Structure formats: structure tokens, C-alpha cells
């Protein structure tokens, strides 16, 4: 069976959402083209510096490889954080990513929780446990990671921070925020994210219209091998995200293209909701700054969640404001 795009080479892959059978080269070209279209929409093509937040997983490889095919690699700079989780060894992956990035001409900044906060994630969790704090490792991890990535973006004067979230991640997050009725978080999604603080570097997701199975195949075809080592802190509880994921896969199976339809419809809706929200509240108020670290924090807070977690774990000695 010949590839339905070039009609020259043998087809190797079936793309259910388009109904086409493609050869390896046309499949890779299709992904690059779709990432380029999304990047154009979000303004990446006009940026002078973009920080790529890379974990070493397959999506971060696909992010770097696709962007470097249409953006000068001197404008791209990658950033990786080691959380400090014993037994969760991703050194091989980082090594492999470092090699691929250098072949693409992209510089890599390597950081760690230890270096930037003084503690590894394991140390934070040990202290939190001793203090009887019932907060999951992912809450610590996600919060500090977001903060460090934003700081890194600011330090290199990046116009954007790009992450490797794919279509599956994005639609799951949209549905979860819909279920929770979290309007602010919901309208921060979409292809034109809101900037609620001058200290935030805009976060964008160039792979947000690429299915996870497509990023997996792309990485595989390009020779990027990955073994997914599971983080020991991963919860085995059936989380809302896991249930949403399962439901979305069922819908996608029944009707290929469903996830793409959801995200496209959502982007249209988000634009209108954003406009009416901004006009009804006059303007989006700048987020308050944390009294300890100076970084933006949520409306109504004096200190940010990260500093609060460190204080409650006995790792930062400040008084918490009385709430
Ligand atoms: Fe961090 Fe592990 Fe949670 Fe992922 S699963 S957010 S790496 S603690
Ligand atoms: Zn082809
Ligand atoms: Zn703070």
C-alpha cells in the first residue's frame, strides 16, 4: 500500500483522525507542519528567544526537534530540572536528550531543586512527613517546577516558555477544569494564554494539537529511545485525571478526531469567554507578589504556595500570616 500523501513510498502508519495511511517521512512532515501552524498562531515565529522546558521524556525531544526545523536554533534554549527523587533515575534520558539537543544546536541549562531551593524533593517530603503535613509530592514538585521554569525564562529574557504538553494532556486538563468550574484556570488555557503578572513569562504548548501516540511514533522514528521509569511518588489512587483519560480514549476510539474537535471548539469558546471576562472585570488585575520570595501568587494570598509549603515543612523559618 502506497503512502496517500506522496504516493511514492510504502505506507507504514495509519492516522485514524485523518483516515490516511502515510509513509514515515510524510508522517514526520505532517507533525512538523501542524506544530508550525500552532506555533505561528501563538506567535512563536516572531519570538527572539524561547525557553524549552525539557524533562528528557519523548515529548520534550519532539518539542525540540520540531521547533528546530523551522526556528533558528540560536533562538531556542532548553532547560531541565532534576527534582532529586531517589530511584527515579532519568540520567540516561537527559544524556540522550543532551546529545540530540547539541546535534540540533540547542544549548541546555541544567538545574535542580537542590541547587535552586536548597532541598531535593525527597528532602522536602521527609521534612513534610516529620511535621505531619499531608501534602502530596506532586504538589511540591509541580509548584516548584513551575516557579523555577518561569525564573529560568525570565533570566534568559525569553519571550515564551514552551512545554511539551500534547493533545491528550491538554484535553484532559480542559475537561478537569470544566468539571471543577475553575474559570480563571480554564481561560488561561487556549492558544492565547492570559498573562496575569508582569513577572510571568508566557507559557505555550506547541504540541497541543498532536496526539500522544503521534509524539511516541515521531520519537521512535527519529531514533529517540525512552524507557518510561515510573516516579515512586506516582499515586495508585484512581485520580480524576485517570478517569477523564479513560473516558476520552473511549470517545476517541469510537470517533477518531474527537480530541482535536474538543480542543478546536474549546479555543473558539475560550476566546469569547476571555473577552467577556476581561470586559466584565474591566481588566485582569495583576497577581499579588509573595512577601517572602517576591514571585506572583494567587489572588488573596500574601505568600505563595511554595513558600508556605517550605514553612509548614520546617524548611523555611518565617511566620505564616494569620488567616
Ligand atoms: Fe513530580 Fe513524581 Fe509527581 Fe511527577 S509523579 S509531579 S515527577 S512527584
Ligand atoms: Zn509519503
Ligand atoms: Zn514565595
Image: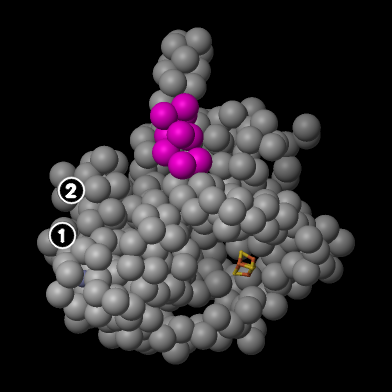
- Highlighted range, magenta: 261-270
Up the image or down, 130 lies above or below 185; here it is: below
**Which of the 4 image quadrants contains residue 109?**
bottom left
Tell me the residue at 46%/29% (across/down).
270
Residue with the mark numbered 2:
45
Q: How is the image coloured?
A: one colour
Viewer-closest of 247 and 295? 247
Q: Position of residue 212 (x, y in %)?
A: 47, 64
**Mark 1: few, some, or many residues within 10 Å (few <14, many ≥20)?**
some
The reply, left or right, for residue 245 in relation to residue 42 is right
SS type, badge 1: loop
Q: Residues within 10 Å of mark 2 (few under 14, many from 20)?
A: some
Name the residue: 66% across, 62% down.
138
Q: Residue at x 47, y 15 (%)?
A: 276
Quadrant holding the N terminus: bottom left
Are the two marked residues, 1 and 2, in contact with CB atoms closer than 8 angstroms?
yes
In the drawing, does residue 71 fall left or right of residue 39?
Answer: left
Left or right side of 154 for 129 = right
Q: Does residue 152 appear anywhere in the picture? A: no
Give the label on residue 288, or none: none
Which residue of the protein is positioned furthest toward the right in this rendering? 132
* Residue under numbered circle 1: 70
Asked if the stretch drawn in magenta spans residue 50, the answer is no
Label 2, secondary structure: give it.
helix
Amino acid at each position: 500500500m502506497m503512502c496517500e500523501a506522496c504516493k511514492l513510498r510504502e505506507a507504514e502508519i495509519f492516522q485514524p483522525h485523518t483516515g490516511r495511511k502515510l509513509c514515515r517521512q510524510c508522517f514526520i512532515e505532517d507533525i512538523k507542519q501542524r506544530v508550525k501552524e500552532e506555533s505561528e498562531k501563538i506567535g512563536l515565529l516572531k519570538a527572539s528567544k524561547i525557553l524549552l522546558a525539557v524533562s528528557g521524556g519523548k515529548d520534550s525531544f519532539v518539542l525540540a526537534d520540531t521547533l528546530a526545523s523551522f526556528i533558528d536554533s540560536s533562538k531556542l534554549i532548553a532547560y531541565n530540572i532534576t527534582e532529586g527523587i531517589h530511584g527515579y533515575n532519568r540520567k540516561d534520558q537527559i544524556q540522550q536528550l543532551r546529545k540530540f539537543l547539541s546535534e540540533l544546536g540547542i544549548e541546555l541549562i541544567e538545574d535542580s531543586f537542590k541547587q535552586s531551593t536548597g532541598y531535593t524533593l525527597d528532602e522536602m517530603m521527609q521534612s513534610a512527613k516529620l511535621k505531619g503535613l499531608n501534602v502530596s509530592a506532586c504538589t511540591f514538585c509541580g509548584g516548584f517546577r513551575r516557579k523555577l521554569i518561569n525564573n529560568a525564562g525570565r533570566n534568559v529574557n525569553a519571550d515564551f516558555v514552551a512545554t511539551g504538553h500534547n493533545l491528550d494532556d491538554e484535553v484532559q486538563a480542559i475537561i478537569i477544569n470544566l468539571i471543577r468550574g475553575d474559570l480563571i484556570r480554564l481561560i488561561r488555557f487556549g492558544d492565547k494564554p492570559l498573562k496575569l503578572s508582569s513577572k510571568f513569562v508566557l507559557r505555550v504548548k506547541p504540541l497541543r494539537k498532536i496526539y500522544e501516540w503521534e509524539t511516541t511514533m515521531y520519537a521512535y522514528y527519529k531514533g529517540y529511545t525512552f524507557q518510561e521509569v515510573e516516579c515512586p511518588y506516582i499515586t495508585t489512587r484512581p485520580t480524576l485525571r485517570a478517569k477523564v483519560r479513560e473516558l476520552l480514549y473511549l470517545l476517541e476510539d469510537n470517533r477518531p478526531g474527537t480530541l482535536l474537535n474538543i480542543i478546536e471548539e474549546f479555543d473558539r469558546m475560550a476566546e469569547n469567554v476571555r473577552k467577556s471576562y476581561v470586559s466584565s472585570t474591566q481588566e485582569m488585575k495583576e497577581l499579588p507578589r509573595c512577601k517572602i520570595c517576591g514571585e506572583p501568587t494567587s489572588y488573596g494570598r500574601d505568600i505563595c504556595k511554595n513558600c508556605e509549603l517550605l514553612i509548614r515543612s520546617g524548611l523555611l523559618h518565617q511566620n505564616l500570616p494569620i488567616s
